């Protein structure tokens, strides 16, 4: 028995079996499943909320160090490089040493687990994703905390299944999905988006039953209540509130959706290409992997000093954009620059997501589009910020191929409920044209790539060490 298995079973052995088993003796009943989904939601909310605060704490501490002790002993640029390189090193080391499945977003891992093709080693992934994510995101790299929060939520769903010794496969599946919904709900303060993400984006894997849908709803609501009780009930993004645009302007929102549909297909291909390039660089060798990651972290520490707009997840950048802080030309330059930095950071395999960077990209291009149209058609009285909000949802719809989730996510994050009609039109146009151009959902592509690479690695192992993918999925059961 390995050390990780011993740790897992030692945790399970501490549970008072009799009282729990009496309550869960009929684990298929709605009462027991919904009760467990409530536990999953509360725990996902706690982990997601405090993960956000932990990342913020690391970022603030890094800045304080630069301003005080370390900055006085070393040149500012060198101190920034070393601090961010050290933080990135922590993230990359934890991933490569303890849980390779914690690299990247983590959402494809949860989708694979829902299909029975990927293991859920929650006792490894939870600490690695939490502390590794603190290091990678705290270094200033262009990564989001939303994907990691979804993966940690899914791991909590499987952890609860294991601790309560749930044997029914449908119940285990429902709790896994519930954790993912709770994670997204807590990450974005968006309970409806958390529910819809599981039922729309994960629709090929999600088992639709009345109990499973209720479990997802309860978990998402519980996680969001935890988030709001710790933080506040305000929207995640503070920005102007817009009224519904005039009907003649809806054609412009459709045009914006078409542009994002084309870009979304290209963006998804660039993501997988960037991952393949980094694999060729580090060849999955730990020393190469850590050196590459640390150098990237250090470089983003420097970038944070001189061009901060090209660093970080991008959520903090959105209010500045929508308040008119940049001209159209600069917005397009930042758009191109953040495409490059997003590809570098996410492609490197750091433990971080791509949700927030995509929302920032959508805002940049959408606001630039609004400014250009405003200058060309001044008589229409166009508000560029409306196109920024529409762009957030459009890029999400084009890349993730979940338009309803994108619409709800943007509305809940910005409180701009009057823009629901232009959001629907833009997201529909983006999703439709992405499909016409042969685009595939980004998380499905990433899962397919992971399974393909695992199969290739298994072929290179000696027969006694090879483990079929399907069998590996039973490791955590």
Image (tube, grey):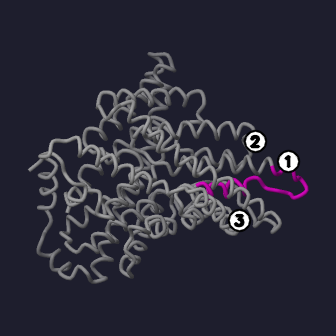
Image location of residue 117, percent across then percent down: 29, 59
Q: Residue at x 33, y 46 (%)?
A: 453
Q: Residue at x 75, y 41 (%)?
A: 328
Q: Is residue 152 magenta?
A: no
Q: Residues within 10 Å of mark 1 (few under 14, many from 20)?
A: few
Sequence-earlier tag: 3 or 2: 2
**Alpha-carbon span between mark 2 and mark 1:** 10 Å
Horizontal side of residue 136 vs 341, given as left or right: left
Residue ID for mark 2: 328
Q: Are marks 2 and 1 in contact (CB under 8 Å)?
A: yes
From what the image shows, is residue 268 above or below residue 291? Answer: below
Q: Are marks 3 and 2 in contact (CB under 8 Å)?
A: no
Image location of residue 179, percent across then percent down: 36, 64
Q: Nearer the viewer, residue 437 or 424?
A: 437
Q: Provide the residue span drawn in magenta.
A: 373-395
Horizontal side of residue 436 vs 325, given as left or right: left
Image location of residue 437, percent across then percent down: 60, 56
Residue ID for mark 3: 422
Q: Residue at x 64, y 65 (%)?
A: 428
Q: Residue at x 40, y 50 (%)?
A: 51
Position of the C terminus, as image quadrant, is bottom left
Under circle 3, the secondary element is: helix
Image location of residue 319, percent across then percent down: 65, 48
From what the image shows, is residue 214 above or below residue 419? Answer: below
In the rendered structure, find residue 375 and report the number of the disc placed on it.
1
Q: Is residue 394 magenta?
A: yes
């Amino acid at each position: 028995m390995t050390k990780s298995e011993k740790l897992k079973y030692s945790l399970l052995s501490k549970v008072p079996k009799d009282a729990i088993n009496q309550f869960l003796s009929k684990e298929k009943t709605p009462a027991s499943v919904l009760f467990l989904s409530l536990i999953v939601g509360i725990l996902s909310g706690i982990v997601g909320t405090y993960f956000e605060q932990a990342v913020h704490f690391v970022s603030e501490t890094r800045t304080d160090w630069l301003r005080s002790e370390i900055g006085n002993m070393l040149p500012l640029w060198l101190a920034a490089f070393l601090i961010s390189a050290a933080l990135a090193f922590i993230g990359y080391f934890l991933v490569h040493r303890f849980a390779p499945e914690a690299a990247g977003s983590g959402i494809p891992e949860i989708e694979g687990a829902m299909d029975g093709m990927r293991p859920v080693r929650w006792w490894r992934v939870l600490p690695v994703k939490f502390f590794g994510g603190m290091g990678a995101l705290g270094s200033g790299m262009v990564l989001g905390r939303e994907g990691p929060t979804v993966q940690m939520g899914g791991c909590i769903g499987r952890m609860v299944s294991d601790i309560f010794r749930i044997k029914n496969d449908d119940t285990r599946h429902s709790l896994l999905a519930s954790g993912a919904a709770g994670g997204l709900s807590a990450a974005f303060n968006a309970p409806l988006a958390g529910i819809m993400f599981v039922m729309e984006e994960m629709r090929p894997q999600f088992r639709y039953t009345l109990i499973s849908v209720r479990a997802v709803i309860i978990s998402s609501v519980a996680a969001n209540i935890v988030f709001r009780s710790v933080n506040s009930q305000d929207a995640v993004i503070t920005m102007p509130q817009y009224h519904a645009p005039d009907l003649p302007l809806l054609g412009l929102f459709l045009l914006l959706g078409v542009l994002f549909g084309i870009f979304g297909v290209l963006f998804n291909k660039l993501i997988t290409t960037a991952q393949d390039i980094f694999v060729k660089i580090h060849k999955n060798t730990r020393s190469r992997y850590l050196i590459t990651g640390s150098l990237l972290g250090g470089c983003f520490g420097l970038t944070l000093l001189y061009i901060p707009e090209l660093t970080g997840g991008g959520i903090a950048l959105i209010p500045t954009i929508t308040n008119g802080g940049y001209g159209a030309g600069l917005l397009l330059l930042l758009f191109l620059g953040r495409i490059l930095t997003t590809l570098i950071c996410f492609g490197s395999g750091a433990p971080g997501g791509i949700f927030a960077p995509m929302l920032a990209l959508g805002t940049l291009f959408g606001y630039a589009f609004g400014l250009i149209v405003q200058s060309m058609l001044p008589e229409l009285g166009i508000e560029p910020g409306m196109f920024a909000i529409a762009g957030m949802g459009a890029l999400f719809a084009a890349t993730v191929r979940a338009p309803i989730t994108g619409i709800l996510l943007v509305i809940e994050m910005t409180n701009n409920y009057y823009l629901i009609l232009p959001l629907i039109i833009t997201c529909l146009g983006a999703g439709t044209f992405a499909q016409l151009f042969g685009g595939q959902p980004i998380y499905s592509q990433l899962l397919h790539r992971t399974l393909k690479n695992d199969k290739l690695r298994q072929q290179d192992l000696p027969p006694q060490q090879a483990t079929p993918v399907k069998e590996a999925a039973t490791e955590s059961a």
